[in-house]
Image: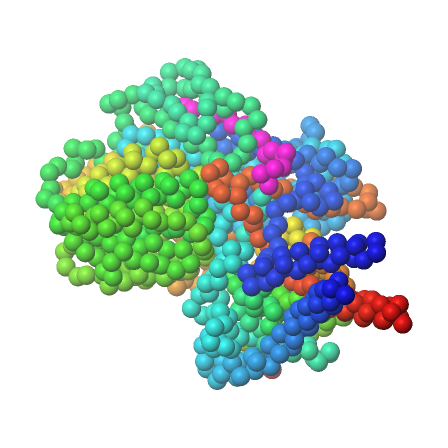
Amino acid sequence: MKTVIAIFAIGFCLFFDGIYLKAKAILGQHLLDVSWQQTLDGGKQIKPWPWADTWPVAKLVYSRLDKHYIVLAGATGRTLAFAPGLLSGSMRPGGVGHSIISAHRTSHFRFLKDVKMGDIFEITDGNGLPYRYKVDDIQIVDINETDLLMNNDYSRLSLITCYPFDDLRASSTKRFIVSAVLDLQAIGD
Amino acid sequence: MTILRRMRVITLSFFNLIIIQQAGADVPVLLFVSDTEQGSLEAPLLDTDVKISINGITARVKVNQKFKNTTDQWQEATYMFPLPENAAVDHLKLIIGDRIVEGEIQEKQQAKKTYIAAKQAGKKASLLEQQRPNIFTTKVANIAPGEEIIVRIEYQQEVSYDKGIFELRFPSVVGPRYTPLHQISEGLITIGEDGFSQTLSGEHILISPVIPPESQRKNVLTIAADINAGIELASLESRYHDIIKQKKSQGHWATKLGMEDVIADRDFVLTWQLKLGQEPKAAFFQNSDGEDHYALMMLVPGNEVFKEVTRLPKETVFVIDTSGSMGGASIRQAKQAMALAVKRLPKGDYFNIIEFDSRYTTLYPRSVAVTESTQNEALTFVNALVADGGTEMSAALHKALDNQRSGSRVRQVIFLTDGAIGNEHDLFSIIKDKIGKSRLFTVGIGSAPNSFFMKKAAEYGRGTFTYIGNVEEVSEKMQNLFSKLSAPVLTNLQVDWPEDSQVEMWPRKIPDLYQGEPLIIKAKLKAPKGAVSISGQTRANLWKTSLNFGEQKNHDGIPQLWARQKISSLLDSVYEGADADAVKRDITALAIKHHLVSKYTSLVAVDKTTARPIEEELTSKEVPQHHPKGWLHKRTLAYPKTALRDDLNIIIGLSLVMFSGFLLWKRRRMKV
C-alpha cells in the first residue's frame, strides 16, 4: 500500500509542478497588464509585483494567430516563467540594432512554429510607439552558431525559442529563430 | 513485483531529476555554448604563425592563420581574434597550396556580399572584418575535406616606448568580454537605468566559443620577430614566453619562440632597450606619395627638463573592478597593486576607494584625509575584496567623477580593471561629460585586458594607461605609475608646423606629458619646407625643440599609420556630435584609399575557380579559442534557455497517478 501512495504522491507532485509552470505563464500575462498600462502612461521600470527584478518593456502582437504578449526586461529563468523576455544588452525595439526576445517553447513561443515568411509582428515600445517588423528569416541553429546574434547592422527583431518544439527534455542544443526586419514603410503611418 | 521494483527505480531517478530542476528553477539556468566539439562535426583546426619585422619605431606584422579541415565535409570557418588596437590592417591573402589570391578592400556590406556570393558559388574565399577596433574576424569558405588553407593578414603598427623601454605586443586571445548579456549567465541581473543595459551604437554581443579545458584541441602559435634598431641593444626580452635570440649584425637581432606547441592563450610581449646614453630624444619618419607628405614623430623630453618643483596636495580616488572576469590571477594582482598604492599615499593627501561588480561600494562616502587609521581601514577593505558578479562600470564611474571638490587640489582617479565590457562607447561619454578637472589613469590587469577601452578611457580622461600582465610586474609597474603621477607635468604643448603646409595632425589636442613618456604625432602635409618646432611649459620654465624636414627618407607604412589614427579620431568625433553619416562616408573613402580594414570597410579575397560542387553541402563552424591564461574557466553564453520540463512533468505525473490508481484497483480485486 505504501508503494501505491508513494507513486501517487510523486505523480501528483510532478503533475502539479507542470501545471504550476503552465499557470504561471498564463497568469503572468494578466498580472502584467496593470504595470504595462502604467508604463504606457509614462512610468519607468514599473515592477509588476514588489519583489520583481524585471518590468514590462514592450508589447508584442502577432495578429494572424491573435497572439499578444507583454515583454519583460531580461531573459532569465525567473522572467521567462511569466512572459517573453527582451535580452538585456540587446537593442530596445525600434532602435537601430538587434532586439532579441526569447520565451519558452512550451508556452508563449509555441506559436513560432506556425510563423511564415513575410508575416508581420507588431511591437509597441514603452513610450507607446508602434513598430512593424516583417519576417525575413526563419531558421534552426545549433547553440554554437552565434553569428546570427552579431547581426546588428539594421533594426532587427529576433524571436528565439528552443527546438524541437515537441521535445520533452528541459534542455536543448538547438534554437528556433524567427527574425524580422523593421518595415520602414510602415513608420510613416 | 519486479515491475514494481523497476518502477521504483525509475520514479527515484525521476525524482532526482526533479530535484535538480527545482534547485535550478529560481536561479536563472542558461545554456552555455563553448563546446564546439559537442556538435556532429569538428571546427577546422587552426595554427597561427606570426612574423614581426621591427624597423626603428614601426613594425610590419604578417599573421598566417592556417585552417585545417579534418572532416570529410566541405567547411566554412569563422575565427575571432584580437590585434593591437593601433594596427593598420592593409593586406589579406588567401593561400591555397602554391596559389595566392590577393584580397581587395571594399565597403563592409559590399565585401560581405562579395564573400557570400563566392561562398554560394562554391569558390574559395576569405573575408576579414573588424568587429571592434581591436577585434577582427576571418571567414574562410569552402575548405575541402582534409584541406589546409592559409589566410595571411598583414598590418603596420608603431611600437610603444616608455622610460627607455620599447615594447611590442601581439595579442593572441580575445578575453571573453563582459557584455550585459553575460549578467544573465551569471545569474546576476543588473539592468541599466532605462531597463536594459543599452549601448548607444547598438553594439552588443561579441561571443567566441571557448575551448573547454578538457579538450585536446590546441590553437598553436609560432612567432618570429626581427628587430632592426639601428643602434646596439642593451636588452631584448619576452615578458611571458621563452625566446631564442640571435644577433645578426650591429643592432639587428632575430628572435623566435623557444618552445614548440605554444598555445595561444596569452599576449606575446617583446621589450628591448638601446645601449645607455643613446635613447632617442626625437625620432622622425617620413613618407611621400608625391601628392601628400606623411610624418610620424616621437619625442622624449629628457629628465633634465623636470627639476625640483613644489608638490601640490592631491586627491586620489581608486576604482577597482571586482567582477567575475577579474577572478583568478587578475584580482590577486589588483589587490596587490591597491595595497601598494594605499601604503604609498602621502599623509595630508585625500583618498577614497570604490569597488564595483554588479553594483558599487565605497570605502568612505567621500574622500578622507590620509592617516594611519584610514590607511589601515583601506587595507582591510582591499584585503576582503572578492571577484564575482557582473560589470556595471557606469555607476562606479559616475560615483568616481561626481562631487569633485573645487580648489587647487590635483584630483587623480586610478581605475584598475580588465575592461571586460562590451559597451565602451557609453562609458566614454560618461568620462567625457564628467571628467572636469580630474585625470583618469587606467591600469589594465590580467592576461587579456581590453586595452582599447583602457587606452581610450585614459585619453578621454586626459591620463595614461598602464598594463600589468603578470603578478611579478605589479610592484614595478605601480611604482612607475606613482612616481609618474607625482612627477611634474609638461603642459600647454604646442606644435608649430611650417607655414602653408595644410597640416592634418593627430592627436589634435596634445595631452599633458608625464615624466619619461613619449609624445607621438602623426601628420599629413603638403610640400613642407624647413622645420617643425615643439614647445611646452614646465612649472618652472619653457621647453622647446625642433625637427627638420630636410633629410628625407621614405619609410614604409607611415601613411597607413596616419590614416588609422585619423579613422580613430573620426570615429571619436561622432561622440562629440559630428554627423554619423558624414563620418561613415569619410572613413570609407579614407580606408579605401589606404587599403585599410575599418569599421566600414573589409578585405575580401575570392578565388577565381570553383572548388566545391554545388550539390555538396557546406557546414559552418566557429573556431574556438583558448581561455586567457589565469582566467577561471567560465563558459561563454549565447542563447537563453527556453525549454521547460512542464509538459514532461504533466505527462509523467499523470501517468504515475493513473498507475497508482491501477495498482489500487488490482489490489482490491485480489482481496475480493
**Rendering colour mode:** rainbow
Compare residues B651 and B278 and report the one nearer the observer: B651
Image quadrant occupied by the C terminus of chain B = bottom right
Residue at (66% x, 44% y) in the render: B36
Residue at (73% x, 64% y) in the render: A2
The x, y position of residue B596, in whole percent, is: 51, 44
Compare residues B282 and B626 and report the one nearer the observer: B626
In the displayed structure image, the side of residue A108 where residue B471 appears, left or right: left
The x, y position of residue B252, in whole percent, is: 41, 19
Query: Residues in magenta?
Result: B211-228
Q: Can residue B204 be seen in this view?
A: no
Compare residues A38 and B525 and report the one nearer the observer: A38
Within the magenta stretch, is there residue B421?
A: no
Residue at (46% x, 27% y) in the render: B241
Q: Is residue B147 visible?
A: yes
Residue reaching furthest front?
B671
Say above or below: B420 vs A17. Answer: above
